[in-house]
Image (tube, rainbow, N blue to C red):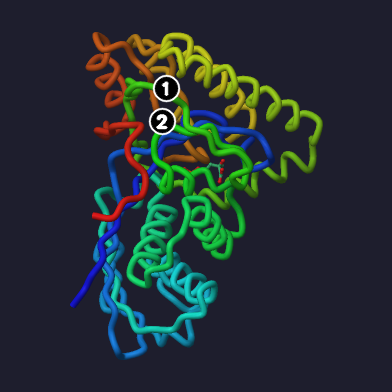
Amino acid sequence: MQSITTSAPGKLLLMGEHAVVYDHPCIVTAVNHRMKIRLFLTDDNQMTLNAPDVEVMNYQKSVSSLVSHDMPKGAQFVEIAVRNFFQTYHLKQGINITSTSDFSSQFGFGSSSAVTVATIKALSEIFDKSMSDRELFDLSYKTVLDIQGKGSGFDVAAAVYGGTLFFVTGGKRIEPISVQNIPLVVGYTGVKADTVKIIERVKKIADQYPIFVEGIYGLIEELVKEAKTCLEKNNFAEFGKLMIMNQGLLESLGVSTEKLSQMNSGAIKAGAYGAKLSGAGGGDCMIAVAPAEKRSEVSTAIEKSGGTIIDVQTNTNGIRVE
Ligand code: PMV
């Protein structure tokens, strides 16, 4: 039985969160924690899914009735990815899919977008439908929007293209940034963030104070552009200063938490160039950029502030067939 295995990387948002939902740029890097999809064809007209990491075992649905409701949460992205792929290419065929993850879906590393991209890539391979990276991005982004209704697509871009990207909402710009390995220290808060809820909260503030929030987004955009230049020069000391300013603007939107702020200030006191939350806020991870000789002090300080250090390499490969 012929099977295809694909894998797509998770991501860390380096700068520009929230503003990127509203037509501003962000910088995202792909990380070495990957989602893997193994897929083979069956003749039973069913989609069978096993996703042990999210406790989905032997989930089955007729390929004629793939819908965006009435399914366990852990199956959503795969199921809608299959539906959208079949609709696009006018296909219907039994398939068996197993998804496995290198990382916990709690970290906020983008497991949903990575599993979506890996599923669509695996389908395109097994059905011999050649898709460009752009087509893979577009169909995967549509899938994420079908389920979440919100999101800029930065995480989908990281899963497809890999590396470190300058990204504008919906993929209006997706440009690789040439940077060496970023000396990042990643601290997990232990709290799972609800991205969609936080986006809605920020939208309420923006509806009430559009001028202020647009002003904040404008400043975030300037920081992102400056940060891109710093990364291209591998100037992490300056990049760190910009991270601190970005964190301040995120605090003003109310998306940081006491724990995130403590972890950030602990890291900076211990010698990091800069630190900030990464992603929607409300929990998940913070990131610090630190000189090599301060790395272990910075890690200890983050742990003392209640965080868990996650070993992460940045700037890694995008989607691939294994
Ligand atoms: O919480 P995460 O890691 O999925 O990041 C969300 C970042 C936002 O800018 C708030 C949303 C988005 O889709 O860009």
Q: Quadrant of residue 29?
A: top left
In the structure shown, which secondary structural element does the residue marked by tag 2 occupy?
strand
Residue 316 image point, x, y percent: 32, 36
Whether ligand 1 has any atom under 8 Å from the Cβ at mark 1 is answered as no
The amino acid type, in three-letter code, at marker 1 is Asn
**Callout 2 amino acid:** Met
Helix, strand or loop status at disc 1? helix
Checking the image for residue 139, the label placed there is none
- Seen in the image, is 144 located left or right of residue 53? right
Query: Residue 225's spot in the image, x, y percent?
Result: 60, 22
Mark sitting on residue 264: 1
Mark 2 in CB contact with mark 1 (< 8 angstroms): yes
| The C terminus - image quarter | bottom left
Residue displayed at 31% across by 90% down:
44
From the top left corner, tell me how far across and down residue 159 is, in percent.
41, 47
Identify whether 64 is placed above or below 185.
below
Which residue is tagged 2?
Answer: 286
Q: How many angstroms separate mark 2 from mark 1 (CA)?
A: 7 Å
Mark 2 closeness class: few <14, some 14–19, many ≥20 residues within 10 Å: many
Q: Is mark 2 within 8 Å of ligand 1?
A: no
Residue 238 at x, y percent in the picture: 48, 10
Camera-side residue of 87 and 50 = 87
Q: Mark 2 vs mark 1: which is more N-terminal?
A: 1
- Residue drawn at the location 36% of the way across and 37% of the way down: 189
